[in-house]
Amino acid sequence: MTRAVFASHNAHKRDEVWAVLAPLLPAWTSADIASAKDFDVPPPVEDGVTFAENALVKARAVCAATGLPAIADDSGISVHVMGGAPGIFSALWAGEHGKDDDNLRLLLAQLVDIPDEHRGAAFVCAAALVLPDGTEVVREGRMEGRIARERAGAGGFGYDPIFVPDGYEVTAGELTPAQKNAISHRGKAFTALAGDLGAL
């Protein structure tokens, strides 16, 4: 029986989230979390101005459409010297949603003249849970680091191949899934949300 619906059509993200939640929810199986795609719920217009607002937009839409508890996240990369951009526009940075290679190339080009000491950045994630009774919870996580000079690694997705987490000399794209989940913004946010999910 489905316990919750994950408000995303992104298979990479759903797998990453389940990898974080599985050891924290031992009574659950992967079948307990369905995808919005399984219910043919179209992605809503993300018109929030923060990660938390957009996560709630998605979770509310899926909860309303399915009548089930819904979980969602919104995440992106925040470059300090760019005033926090791309931020909520991370997936659209090059102009078209989900074009990871184009987004990476554009961000690297924009930072080409920025010295290493000013290439600080953070991945930010807001994880939301919306219940049919109107209850709403948002948990947030951050992974601090810096933008590399060039891409490296074939793991992860999004900006992972150009983001070097604090304490590492390799990009998030070069980490194993387990290594990344242990320190990632998404891992931290959903670890915090696991306590709320465990009460369902």
Image (cartoon, grey):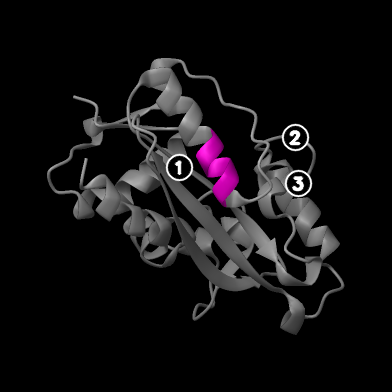
Question: Which residues fall within the magenta stretch?
Answer: 52-57
Q: Hey, what amino acid is under mark 3?
A: Trp
Would you place residue 183 above or below residue 199 in this image?
below
Q: Farthest bottom residue?
A: 117
Could you give the CA–CA distance between mark 1 and mark 2, rounded to whole angstroms? 19 Å
Would you place residue 108 above or below residue 41 in this image?
below
* Sequence-wise first label, 1 or 3: 1
- What type of secondary structure mainly makes up the magenta span? helix
Q: Give the residue number, with chain letter if any, for mark 3.
A: 93
Q: Nearer the viewer, residue 67 or 95?
A: 67
Is there any visible trace of residue 199 in the rendered image?
yes
SS under mark 3: loop
Q: Nearer the viewer, residue 175 or 32?
A: 32
Mark 2 in CB contact with mark 3 (< 8 angstroms): no
| Residue 122 figure quarter | bottom right
Figure quadrant of the N terminus:
top left
Would you place residue 69 above or below residue 49 in this image?
above
Q: Farthest right residue?
A: 113
Can you tell which mark lies on residue 122? none
Write the residue at 67% across / 62% down. 78
Could you give the CA–CA distance between mark 1 and mark 3, rounded to whole angstroms? 19 Å
Left or right: residue 156 compared with residue 3 = right
Can you tell which mark lies on residue 13? 1
SS under mark 1: helix
Q: Give the residue number, with chain letter if any, for mark 2.
A: 96
Residue 20 in the image, given as x and y percentages of width and height: 32, 53
SS under mark 2: loop
* Sequence-wise first label, 1 or 2: 1
Q: Hey, what amino acid is under mark 2?
A: Glu
Left or right: residue 196 compared with residue 43 = left
Q: Farthest left residue?
A: 27
